Image: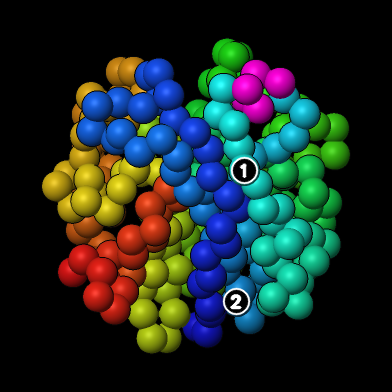
């Protein structure tokens, strides 16, 4: 299968309080989405921070580049995106779902459940009337060569994406690990896992590492494992 994977820089957010644990002292972190273009589909993985939420704007001070702006260099518009995958439903991963009216949206069932029953994230950012949500449970191939992998830990329904092309195996780990270094050492569940999901957090990282992907990408770390001079 022929496919291309491109990283989109959607800006940054400020970390503070319980969102800035001792091992991660940087005051701001990047927010990345990923564009996967296959012979059949245009797939977006995550949609960044949304707008008009006073608490998020005050607490996290997002600096944003819109997904629409990031699509322009690829001669794409939001209407061209046919599939949207939310790795999870934290505010910086689902905020612009509404911009992709033609996209089928793939979210793990457990993620939908917690987001709909707790103050987990701005519900209107993902659960709006026109949202074309496909709820899934576990792993699934959504188009030839593109597989969603259930990787609970950071959230109960976190998922990663494996893209297998004719040349390579590319893993978008998303926030299964916060950084490439954390991924390599097997995870920091005390700081990065959802409460009660510490064991699953480490198990998900172990599973992803066993795939021996040629390249591994993350939601909040610029480092790409296996790419040029990045970590092996």
Q: Position of 218 compared to 67: left or right?
A: left
Up the image or down, 64 lies above or below 128; here it is: below
Who is closer to the viewer here, 144 or 79?
A: 79
Q: In this view, does 174 lie above or below 137?
A: below
Q: Residue at x 72, y 25 (%)?
A: 53
Q: In which quarter of the image is residue 78?
A: bottom right
Circle 1 Cα neighbour tier, 10 Å, few/some/many (<14 / 14–19 / ≥20)? some
Residue placed under numbered mark 1 in the picture: 63
Q: Nearer the viewer, mark 2 or mark 1?
A: 1
Residue 230 in the image: state x and y as whole percent: 26, 69
Q: In this view, does 179 lie to the left or right of 58?
A: left
Check the image and report above or below for 29 versus 15. Answer: below
Label 2 vs 1, first from the N-terminus: 2
With 36 as the anchor, is 149 left or right in this view?
A: left
Which residue lies under the disc numbered 2?
38
Alpha carbon distance from label 2 to label 1? 30 Å
Q: Residue 52 location, x and y as percent?
A: 77, 29
User: Residue at horizontal 38%, vertical 52%?
Assistant: 221
* Magenta stretch holds residue 158: no
Question: Secondary structure of the magenta portion, mostly?
Answer: helix
User: Label 2's element?
Assistant: strand
Residue 224 x %, y %: 33, 64
Using the rendered image of the protein, determine whether residue 153 is visible from the camera's viewpoint: no
Query: Looking at the image, how many numbered discs can be counted on the residues?
Result: 2
171 left or right, relative to 92: left
Q: Name which residue lies at 30% across and 18% down.
A: 196
- Magenta stretch containing residue 55, yes or no? yes
Q: What stretch is highlighted in magenta?
A: 54-58
């Amino acid at each position: 299968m022929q496919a291309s994977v491109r990283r989109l820089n959607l800006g940054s957010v400020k970390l503070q309080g319980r969102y800035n644990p001792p091992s991660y002292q940087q005051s701001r972190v990047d927010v990345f989405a990923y564009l996967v273009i296959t012979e059949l589909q245009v797939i977006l993985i995550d949609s960044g921070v949304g707008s008009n939420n006073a608490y998020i704007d005050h607490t996290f001070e997002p600096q944003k580049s819109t997904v629409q702006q990031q699509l322009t260099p690829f001669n794409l518009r939001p209407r061209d995106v046919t599939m949207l995958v939310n790795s999870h439903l934290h505010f910086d991963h689902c905020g612009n779902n509404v911009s992709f009216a033609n996209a089928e949206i793939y979210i793990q069932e457990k993620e939908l459940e917690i987001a709909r029953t707790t103050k987990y994230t701005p519900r209107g950012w993902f659960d709006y009337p026109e949202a074309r949500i496909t709820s899934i449970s576990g792993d699934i191939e959504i188009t030839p060569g593109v597989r969603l992998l259930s990787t609970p830990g950071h959230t109960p329904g976190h998922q990663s994406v494996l893209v297998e092309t004719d040349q390579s195996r590319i893993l978008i780990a998303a926030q299964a690990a916060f950084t490439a270094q954390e991924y390599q050492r097997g995870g920091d569940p005390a700081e990065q896992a959802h409460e009660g999901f510490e064991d699953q957090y480490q198990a998900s990282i172990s599973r992803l590492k066993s795939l021996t992907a040629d390249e591994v990408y993350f939601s909040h770390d610029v480092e790409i494992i296996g790419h040029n001079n990045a970590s092996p």
